[in-house]
């Protein structure tokens, strides 16, 4: 078994993402003025993964169109980790941010 190399990451999304009905439906508890984010996991460095999203390579539509920047303060302390831990952490981070009233899309 190799060293843990999976990462959870959080991308800030630009405000116009709220105009997408699918995003709004996924966030019924959104509180006005809170950030919009995408939470994902990857076996790559989060910076490289973000660049791939923006370039349209295995991209999530919301990150490609509205991704602004990574928010490392929300995830760096957890990385890197084994695959199964990253899968669980991705869900946990999304749940925590939704509890705070943030608009969240999960990978």
Image (cartoon, helix red, strand yellow):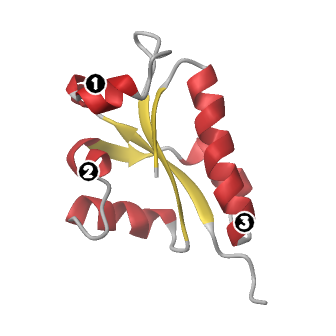
Residue at the (34%, 37%) spot, across then down: 13
> Label 3: how many residues lie within 10 Å, few (<14), some (14-19) or many (20+)?
few
Q: Is residue 102 above or below residue 77?
A: above
Q: In which quarter of the view is residue 99 placed?
A: top right
Earlier-in-chain disc, 2 versus 3: 2
Q: Nearer the viewer, residue 8 or 87?
A: 87
Image quarter where the N terminus lies is: bottom right
Alpha carbon distance from label 1 to label 3: 31 Å
Task: Please provide percent x and percent y for residue 15.
Answer: 27, 26
Q: Which mark is residue 18?
A: 1
* Residue annotated with mark 2: 61
Question: Is disc 2 in contact with disc 1, using a CB cutoff of under 8 Å?
Answer: no
**Left or right side of 18 for 31:** right
Q: Secondary structure at mark 1?
A: helix
Residue at the (51%, 73%) spot, across then down: 44
**Left or right side of 84 for 42:** left
Earlier-in-chain disc, 1 versus 3: 1
* Residue annotated with mark 3: 84
Task: Please provide percent x and percent y for residue 19.
Answer: 21, 24
Residue at the (69%, 51%) spot, across then down: 89
Task: Please provide percent x and percent y for residue 25.
Answer: 36, 24
Q: Secondary structure at mark 2?
A: helix
């Amino acid at each position: 078994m190799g060293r843990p190399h999976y990462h959870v990451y959080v991308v800030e999304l630009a405000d116009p993402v709220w105009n997408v009905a699918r995003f709004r439906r996924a966030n019924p508890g959104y509180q006005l003025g809170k950030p919009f984010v995408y939470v994902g996991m990857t076996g790559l460095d989060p910076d490289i993964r973000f660049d791939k999203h923006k370039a349209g390579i295995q991209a999530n539509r919301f990150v490609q169109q509205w991704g602004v920047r990574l928010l490392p303060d929300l995830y760096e302390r957890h990385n890197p980790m084994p695959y199964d831990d990253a899968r669980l952490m991705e869900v946990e981070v999304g749940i925590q941010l939704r509890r705070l009233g943030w608009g969240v899309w999960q990978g």
